[in-house]
Image (cartoon, rainbow, N blue to C red):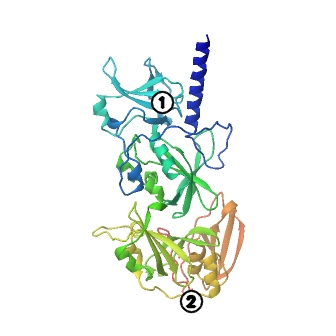
Amino acid sequence: MRRIILTMGLSLAFLAGQAQTASDYIVKTKGAKKSVAPERTLAGGAPDAKQNEPKDFVGKYFQFQSLCDWKPGMKFMVMPEKYDLIVKTFCDENGKEVSSMTLRHQIMIYKGHSVSSEGHAHINFQCLGDNKMYYYEVPNGSFEDYCYGKMGVPTLAYLGDVDMARDKLMGKKLITKTTVYFVDTDYDSDGAKEVKVAANQEVTVTAVGVGTRSFPVKIIVEDAKGNEFFQNVALSKTNSGMRDDEFLLMDNSRHAFYGSFSVLDDMMAVTGSHNDYLGKAIHTKYVTGMITKGDGRERTVRVPKLTTFIIDGINAHRDDGYVTLSLTEMDSRRQYFKDVIFYTPEDVVLDAAEKEKYFGYLFAMGEGLERQTSQAARAAIRAGRVIAGMSEDEVQLAVGEPDRTAEDNTGRYDWIYLRSKGKLLIVHFGRNGLVQSYNTAMDSQKKQPAKKTVRKKTTNSKSSGWQSRPGTPLTK
């Protein structure tokens, strides 16, 4: 009797410990509503793959594991999507189909493959939650025929990537490379909302957990203001169920690791011919977006055509072919940052958005248009503020392109900027194209934004030529 009680006690302890290990892979950003606090414990296990030594971060630590090369002991987590609730993935030892929701968030250990008495190929797993065996039946053909494709086993997110990412990224500095990330809205489900984030800002990794089958690694980062957001990314792409070319699609590109992040340690100083550009004057040939910092804040602003900069720093990325230019604007002495590729593709027709990526298309050597900028305006631009007497270009350099514009029949017009908590910054221009005044107000059009109208530049404006957004017609 004692032996039976002892055995039952050990079994319960084992199952409880494994359930806690599974829950430790679920991480959330700040603010997710928590209805029941899950127990937490330290995650067990370690990565099981030998790593090559390529130059870039992903290639060095995250090797693709083809299903043909899976080794017993590899860890996965069941992360079903809506489709998986209709088409069941696993069967138990008795051959009975099991609901994917029943196995949701369970850790599955790969146990090899076999052939049933009916000749069907099975891919076998042990579930750590209930210590039972399950299998996935290959739809057609042998295991060898099936494993060479990238289909893999549905619902399973590869935890080897999560464990390695925790080891290599926790507490590390990354650079944001896109503007779309997510925050969790609910602790007990996968609810999340999209948030806009400035590109090229430094962030710190605060948590790493499981994401989805296609994008298994959920990386939570925190910016300088304490805001947390995350991206689900694919690293080795093991069992992602996606072809490499599918990651090039617009919606998926940010879910490839380098589509969302650069590793700060992987940035290196530019050598060779790039050093010849340091200290040189350049000017913009087109209106373009840049990152700038002022008054303790970081923002993206639209920089006018013919704006002159001095190149005071060049940092190359090891991973994506870009360099980050540190630029000082000639008049205001404000610092800006822009990612560009230095080489120019030959015999390739590029659209406006593509051209903006290349240094040779976006910039020309030497100074652009000389502007009459007052000392007060330069100080305001550096701080990211608007003051009376500014031109359109100076306002854009200070606070960016407006979200809306409005004008009356006297030639006066307003630039309207959306601010946090429904507030607006309204900049009032006179008929001479200079700022008369500015004020803040609540956004009465928040629920039903007014259609944007954009005014043509007046002939007596001292602005060097503010341009509308691409594709936005000028009103007459």
Quarter containing the N terminus? top right
Residue density around tag 1, few if under 14, some if 14–19, many if 20 or more, within 10 Å:
few
Residue density around tag 2, few if under 14, some if 14–19, many if 20 or more, within 10 Å:
few
In the rendering, at what x and y percent does residue 317 appear? 42, 64
In the rendering, at what x and y percent does residue 270 appear? 40, 71
Locate residue 348: give its quadrant.
bottom left
* Residue occupying the point 66% across, 49% down: 31
| Relative vertical location of residue 241 with respect to residue 282 in this rendering, above or below | above
Q: Is residue 331 left or right of residue 359?
A: right
Name the foreground residue: 176 vs 245.
Answer: 176
Q: CA distance from mark 1 to mark 2?
A: 67 Å
What's the residue type where badge 2 is placed? Gln
Judged from the image, the secondary structure of the residue bearing numbered disc 2 is loop
Q: Is residue 461 left or right of residue 428?
A: left
Residue 313 visible in the displayed image: yes
| Relative vertical location of residue 158 with respect to residue 176 in this rendering, above or below | above
Q: Which residue is mark 2?
A: 372
In the rendering, at what x and y percent does residue 469 appear? 50, 70
What's the residue type where badge 1 is placed? Ile
Q: Is residue 440 left or right of residue 293?
A: right
Q: Residue furthest front?
A: 2
Q: Are marks 1 and 2 in contact (CB under 8 Å)?
A: no
Question: Going from the N terminus, do you reach mark 1 or mark 2 first?
Answer: 1
